[in-house]
Amino acid sequence: MTTILYTAEPHEWLDVDRVRNAFRNDSGGYTLSNAEVLAALRRLLDRLMVETHDRHPLRLYANMRQVHDAAEQRFNAVVKRLFGSDPQGYRRYSACFIDLLSCIFGDLGEESVRLILATVRGDDAGATASIARCLSMVRSRHLDLDHDLVRSAVNVFFREDDPEYSALQWNLAQNIFIAKVLGLDPSGALLSRELFQGATFYLDTNILIAALEPTHGDHGWFQTLVSCAHAVGAELCVCPPTLEELEAWLRNERQLFEKIGTQIPDSIAPRVNSIFLDIYEAGRRGGRELTVDEVFASFANPVVTLASRYGVKMADDPWFRDADLNGQVTGFTTVLQERYLATRGRRKKLGSARHDAKALTWVERQGPKASSGVWFVTTDRSLPGAVPDESEASSLAITAAALMQWISPVVGESAANGDFASSFAQMIRERLLPPDQFFDLKDFLVFHDMHVSMEELPADEVEQTLREIKAHVPYLDPTDPADQQQISRIVARSLADPGSKHKQEVSRLEADNARERAEREAERAEHRKQLQLEKDHAASAIAEAETIRQGAAQDKLVREAKLWIALAAVALIMVWGGLLYLVNGYEDGKNLLQKVRNSFEFFLIAFTIVVAPAGWRIGKKRLGAIGWPFSSWFRAN
């Protein structure tokens, strides 16, 4: 209603008839009666959202127009983020994008209404909403656009966990859902609190998981469901097989987490459907390395938690123990497996399908006994429309998304919060996008079993390998030994493919190692060469120093030898001079020469007395250092 008023000019006054004409249907009638339009406008007046002039003409208050302006700005910001890469401008995609979202959420809204009315039949419960079908419809009305970009943008819009995207999805879905309700049920009974008055809701395992873990994206929605159930006198119940399935699921998840939970690449972790991985990653972001017990702490005592905190009742009955014995659910189990295969592209495990068969059969048995409706609440969209053989019911299950949309207008403004938007976006993500867009912990088990460390592989190579498995063998179960061998062959082939990034990375690393080895060998050779040069230089320097030392020693010996020879010569001259004086004075002879000749033995003795000690003191080294004739004489000897 406010959107209709917003489309008018800011200063334009609208009368009731113009507002009512906006709800004219194709057959010429009106979706809303005049009284309903007046009642709606009266509520807007009470909330001070519109102002009047002369009773009937009205328009939005300026502050409400500002609210709509802000909403339009947020929408334009989302369009800019998604289509900003187009060189011709993102604004030309606005009409196409809103047209596409209206188509998608129109289908989803109609699907939710049909689920609430329980008018679904057989396999058509979740067959209406399809991104591909809506893309095809919108394409013909916007031929001038890049539709590859449109397809990519809408996938990003639904795939990424972004608050702005989630808020826009919730607002569009809720507005279109209400419009669908009013179109299919002008009385408004579908939006009344009495619709589920006194009903009994049996909760599926996936709902219990959200109830037990406070950090789960759907936990806030579940709390609102509890409040709404109490307000309308509805009961929340759980079957014993559901608790058994929860316990089996917890055991399996714990084993998986202990094996591979800490090895998931960071870039893939946001797309892994594992609440336990989310808890672990949140702890790491907070600087804590959580233990396995801390990761699974919220599920320590599920029965007590569900009963004491939320008033969930246990529907125990001997029938659950005897159902398998009398074969009541065997055929229905196979039907549910086939439905899941058609919906999700892989066969549901026998244990899970048997649990669903028991729960739905029990709900069908309780229907005639209950004064109000009995529903099985689940996030599994393959279950609505599935009923046991010979059942008169159309549908026994309702999806959490459909129930969420009904709750929102019933509980009022308290539901219009981030928890609802985020929870709804997650449900729609799983509803619209193909299963290969997301991963489970068990998908990574093959790397563990093959002893391949994911930490040593490129993250996109891990993701591509898992997508190949989902694309080519979607029916295989990584936890089933019978399927592990075939999956292992795919992984081995993918990692060994010369075109794979892993193989290319291995080849690159091997080439890098070879190059590094060659470089290190060249460096070692150069080092050895340099070391030899340094050794040669050192030897040359040592030899040169030795030569210098020997030369210095030789010079010293020569100096000493010359000194002693000189001293010996002086001593000899002095002795001989003395002898000459004595011989000349006392020896007989005609002249000095004759006197000397007659005393020659004295001169020879004096020579010996002087030269012999001097020669001994000088030594061979000093005499050899003088050179010829002494060196030649010593070498000859």
Image (spheres, rainbow, N blue to C red):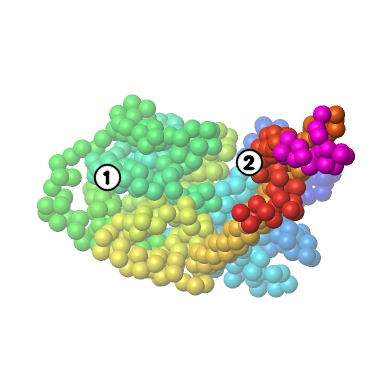
Question: Is 472 one of the magenta-colored residues?
Answer: no
Residue 589: x %, y % from top left: 83, 38
Residue found farthest to the right:
591
* Residue at point 52%, 58% (across, down): 458
* Residue at point 33%, 26% (across, down): 308
* Residue at point 82%, 29% (across, down): 586
Res. 413 visible in picture: yes
Q: Secondary structure at mark 2?
A: helix
Quadrant of the rendering where the C terminus is positioned: bottom right
Mark 1–mark 2 distance (CA, rounded to whole Å) = 50 Å
Tell me if 109 is positioned left or right of 466 in this view: right
Residue assigned mark 2:
40
Tell me if 634 is positioned left or right of 278 in this view: right
Residue 485: x %, y % from top left: 30, 66
Q: Earlier in the sequence, mark 1 or mark 2?
A: 2
Magenta stretch in the rendered image: 586-604
Of residue 153 and residue 496, the one placed in the foreground of this image is 496
Residue 280: x %, y % from top left: 45, 39
* Residue at point 49%, 32% (across, down): 288
Residue assigned mark 1:
248
Residue 450: x %, y % from top left: 35, 59
Alpha-carbon neighbours of circle 2 within 10 Å: few (<14), some, or many (≥20)? some
Q: What is the quadrant of residue 511 in the picture?
A: bottom right
